[in-house]
Amino acid sequence: MKYEATAAYRRFPLSAKYDLDWMLESAMGPNPLWLAEFLSEEMSLRPGMRVLDLGCGKAATSIFLAKEFGVEVWAADLWIDAASNERRVADAGLADRIHPVHCEAHSLPFEKDFFDAVVSLDAYHYFGTSETYIGNLVNYVKPGGEIGFVVPGLATEFEGDPPEHLRDFWVWDFWTFHSPEWWRRHLDRSTKVTVRTADRLEEGWRYWMEWNALDVELKGGSDEEGRMLEIDAGRNLGFTRCIATRADPPGNG
Ligand SMILES: C[S@@+](CC[C@H](N)C(=O)[O-])C[C@H]1O[C@@H](n2cnc3c(N)ncnc32)[C@H](O)[C@@H]1O
């Protein structure tokens, strides 16, 4: 498959400027640049803003956001050490504008009210499904600041087991995949934030499948996930985007 011939190449023009091998090497799942580009279409990112990229992995999205929007980024991650991200950031010529940090999302080493915005790509579902999480995270954003994420998700919640065609593929941590309406309710009822966008990436499953095909073709490995996406054909699986604004004052004590 040729990258330039994919639907994703046309859908994500900012990401299309980046080298495919670099993206494949930097990604830890579905292409995070595409997810960041989708998120940025609804978030207000302006030059000089302080942005926390939470669960940044290998910092590809931090590099993308710094380059495309002129923001200053704190690239925070647990599994990837800060030194290797510092190398990647320096290679991109952005050492003065991206600050890699090794940390746990539940004990962030930042001052309260420090960030203008928090973004998270393919990571928030690892730590953010607990009811208490947003009440902690919101303290690090300035009043009125935005928290936005894109995660693998569902069109609607399952009642009981996954549909028949997904059962053989389903693994326990897919239960962190949720619909836009689930995320809206999950965050809104905290009263700490107001959700202003909760939606899906149209044709997201197709871009995800294209990415897996490119990854398998160029790096090898199994395409089990690609088969699952093809069989499901967007009926359930895709990407959920959610953007919430810090309520001021945050409700509920
Ligand atoms: C699937 S990877 C995605 C990484 C990157 N955003 C990307 O799309 O390539 C999920 C990331 O979430 C991070 N993560 C998971 N749990 C975390 C936690 N409790 N605190 C901080 N980061 C966490 C992991 O370190 C990992 O890099």
Image: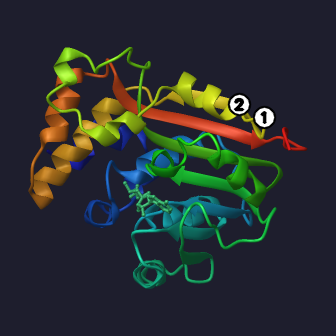
The residue under the point 17% across, 23% down is 231
Is label 1's Cβ within 8 Å of ligand 1?
no
Local packing at callout 2 (Cα closer than 10 Å; few below 14, some 14-19, many 20+) is some
Taking the image as shown, residue 182 lies to the left or right of residue 132, namely: left
Which mark, by number, is residue 99?
none
Residue 106 image point, x, y percent: 59, 61
Residue 161 image point, x, y percent: 29, 19
Q: Is residue 170 above or below residue 151?
A: above
Relative depth, front residue between 179 and 87 = 179
Q: Is residue 106 above or below residue 247?
A: below
Residue 204 image point, x, y percent: 37, 32
Kindly identify the amino acid type of the residue bearing the numbered disc 1. Answer: Thr
Q: In terms of secondary structure, where does tag 2 sit?
A: helix
> Could you tell me if residue 6 is visible in this image?
no
Most extreme residue toward the right, as rendered? 249
Residue 22 image point, x, y percent: 31, 67
Distance CA(mark 1)–CA(mark 2): 6 Å
Relative depth, front residue between 249 and 204 = 249
Taking the image as shown, residue 12 lies to the left or right of residue 141, namely: left
Whether pointer 1 and pointer 2 mark residues with C-beta atoms closer than 8 Å, the reply is yes
Kindly identify the amino acid type of the residue bearing the numbered disc 2. Answer: Asp
Local packing at callout 1 (Cα closer than 10 Å; few below 14, some 14-19, many 20+) is some
Q: Quickly name the residue at label 2.
A: 188
Taking the image as shown, residue 119 lies to the left or right of residue 112, namely: left
The residue under the point 66% across, 35% down is 187
Q: Quickly name the residue at label 1.
A: 191
